[in-house]
Image (tube, rainbow, N blue to C red):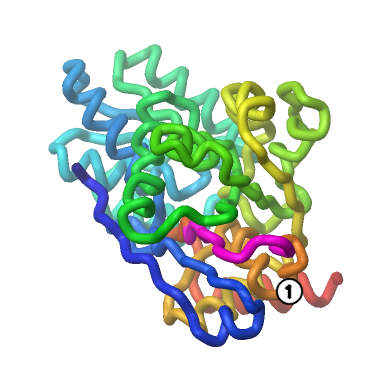
């Protein structure tokens, strides 16, 4: 197992302000700074067990970092294809894990197409960032762990990009008979591919990504989420970039931890978007983390987003 069991924290001031109990599942404390190592690590181990001697991943940042870390731990060379929008911080962290990083295309979809070409040329193990049953089962461990740490919540809040974490959370909830617990899936404006599918009831691709939350930047979510729409109570929420970034900065003050805007989208529901939590007393907040941002970058994004707000 390449991931760690992470703690659940509460913050007295947040609970007092909201008059609710929020349980923060701190997956920002994983070795790679995000939940991604749960599912990506499991898939890398699965590929090694199948005899693959090399791994190729596509990523906006965090999945590639998780694949690079997992590959190094397993003794497998890793190539990660990232889009031009990936931060230098994320790229440097992948390279620190000895991964080859190829920059290709303006979004993750273009990077993924190149990654699949490399897989076809080399017969490497393909590490998709979010669309694989092994990944979902790996991410489901976040719910299995939580069930051993807290009592059944009234709602789970989770950021959604390509849908791997959301699918894993749903898988985990059903595995432990928490299948009636509503899930609030949060995205930023300009990266709301799940909302597009949620609103149409079928897999729907958005035209482009214009959010600073680049790791939420899949033009469409995994098709598996379409089947979950009728199987589980899910609420789709969209917040602004400015709100997500402000939440990251508030969270840094409250918990002394840096997360990226993709995670901040979910966290914003305990800061300036608390009305979305009305009616819920005990809330499980998945702090998915992210290793693509620094405090300096968050401040720069804040200046930019507030200047245009």
Q: Residue furthest right?
A: 309
Residue at image position (40%, 55%) is: 34
Magenta highlight range: 277-287
| Residue 157 visible, this orientation | no
The tally of labels here is 1
Report if residue 281 lies within the magenta region: yes
Residue at image position (67%, 58%) is: 212
Residues 233 and 158: in front is 233
Report if residue 8 lies within the magenta region: no
Mark 1, other Cα within 10 Å: few <14 / some 14–19 / many ≥20: some
Query: Quick check: 104 left or right of 57?
Result: right
**Compared to 101, does 137 lie above or below?**
above
Quadrant in which the C terminus is drawn:
bottom right
Q: Position of residue 7 (x, y in %)?
A: 32, 65
| Residue 14 visible, this orientation | yes
In the picture, residue 135 is in which quadrant? top left
Residues 93 and 222: in front is 222
Q: Which residue is mark 1?
A: 272
Residues 101 and 245: in front is 245
Query: Quick check: 49 left or right of 12?
Result: left
**Compared to 148, does 113 lie above or below?**
above
SS label for mark 1: loop
Q: Position of residue 278 (x, y in %)?
A: 73, 64
Residue at image position (63%, 72%) is: 247
Residue at image position (57%, 45%) is: 181
**Compared to 203, does 162 lie above or below?**
below
In the picture, residue 9 is in which quadrant? bottom left
Q: Position of residue 1 (x, y in %)?
A: 19, 42
Query: Quick check: 62 left or right of 79?
Result: right
């Amino acid at each position: 197992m390449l991931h760690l069991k992470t703690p659940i924290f509460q913050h007295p001031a947040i609970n007092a302000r909201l008059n609710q109990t929020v349980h923060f599942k701190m997956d920002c404390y994983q070795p790679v700074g995000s939940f991604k190592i749960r599912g990506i690590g499991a898939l890398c181990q699965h590929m090694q067990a199948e005899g693959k001697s090399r791994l190729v991943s596509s990523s906006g940042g965090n999945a590639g970092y998780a694949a690079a870390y997992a590959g190094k731990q397993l003794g497998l060379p890793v190539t990660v294809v990232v889009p031009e929008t990936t931060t230098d911080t994320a790229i440097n962290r992948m390279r620190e894990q000895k991964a080859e990083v190829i920059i290709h295309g303006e979004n993750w979809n273009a990077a993924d197409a190149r990654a699949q070409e490399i897989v076809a040329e080399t017969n490497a193990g393909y590490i998709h960032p979010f669309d694989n049953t092994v990944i979902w089962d790996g991410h489901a461990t976040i719910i299995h762990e939580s069930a051993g740490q807290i009592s059944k919540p009234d709602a789970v809040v989770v950021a959604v990009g390509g849908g791997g974490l959301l699918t894993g959370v749903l898988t985990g909830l059903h595995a432990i008979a928490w299948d009636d617990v509503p899930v609030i899936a949060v995205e930023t404006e300009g990266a709301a591919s799940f909302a597009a599918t949620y609103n149409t009831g079928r897999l729907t691709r958005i035209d482009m990504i214009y959010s600073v939350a680049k790791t939420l930047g899949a033009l469409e979510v995994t098709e598996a989420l379409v089947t979950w729409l009728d199987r589980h109570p899910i609420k789709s929420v969209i917040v602004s970039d400015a709100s997500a970034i402000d939440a990251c900065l508030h969270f840094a003050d409250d918990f002394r931890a840096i997360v990226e805007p993709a995670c901040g989208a979910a966290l914003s529901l305990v800061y300036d978007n608390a009305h979305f939590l009305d009616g819920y007393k005990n809330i499980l907040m998945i702090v998915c983390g992210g290793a693509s941002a620094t405090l300096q970058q968050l401040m720069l994004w804040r200046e930019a987003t507030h200047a245009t707000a």
